[in-house]
Amino acid sequence: MTLRTYLFAGLATATIGVAAPVAAAPDQAVIDAVVAGLVAEGYSGEIRIRPSGDTLIVEASGAAGRTERVYSGDGSSLFEEETRNADGSTVEREYDLAGNLVEEEYEGPSDDPRAERAKKEQEDRLEREAERTEERREREEEKAEARREREEEKAEKRRDDDEDDDDDDDEEDEDDDEDDD
């Protein structure tokens, strides 16, 4: 009995395996074409490809932004989950099996809270930098004013010293004139 049980269990497993449809994974030529297309679109950073049955799930990033896409086994695009463009906008696209665009949805950069936060941080950085620049300019002006005042004081002191020397010379000249008389 035990032998028959194992035999029937083995046959049942084999039957289920044969009856289940075998999904053909996309071949290397399709994967190469998808990668070449992504690189041509500007996604030359990190490209991850996960075969899933007869589809390819692709995540890519680069100068063009970031995208997540699903391709059919023949390489035609089925769904573009999300594309984060360099300007912060988002595009979602859905395609039919023939590769025709069925639906497309755009969200501008102002709709994205991360883009708003990044913009606010950039504005804050620029404002802080402007404040630092203004403070540096004011310090430089104060230093320049202090230097001018010191120079003026030195010049005035030199003039006073020169006048005192001239007065002393005049007194000596008068003394000499008196001696001559």
Image (cartoon, rainbow, N blue to C red):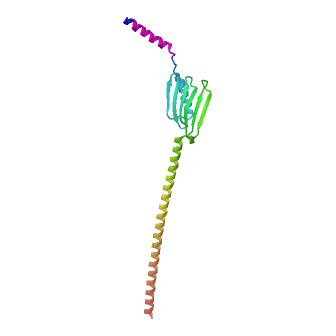
Q: Position of residue 152 (x, y in %)?
A: 48, 72
Q: Position of residue 143 (x, y in %)?
A: 46, 64
Residue at 57% x, 27% y is: 77
| Above or below, 131 relative to 155 | above
| Above or below, 157 relative to 128 | below
Q: Look at the image and say whether residue 49 sits in the magenta stretch.
A: no
- The N terminus - image quarter: top left
Q: Position of residue 57 (x, y in %)?
A: 52, 27
Q: Position of residue 103 (x, y in %)?
A: 61, 30
| Above or below, 28 relative to 46 | above
- The C terminus - image quarter: bottom left
The extreme left residue here reads 2
Q: Considering depth in this image, is 149 or 132 the residue closer to the camera?
A: 132
| Left or right relative to 73: residue 154 | left
Main secondary structure found in the magenta portion: helix
Magenta residues span: 4-21
Q: Considering depth in this image, is 164 or 17 the residue closer to the camera?
A: 17
The extreme bottom residue here reads 181
Q: Look at the image and say whether residue 11 sits in the magenta stretch.
A: yes
Residue 9: quadrant of the picture: top left
Total of numbered circles in the picture?
0
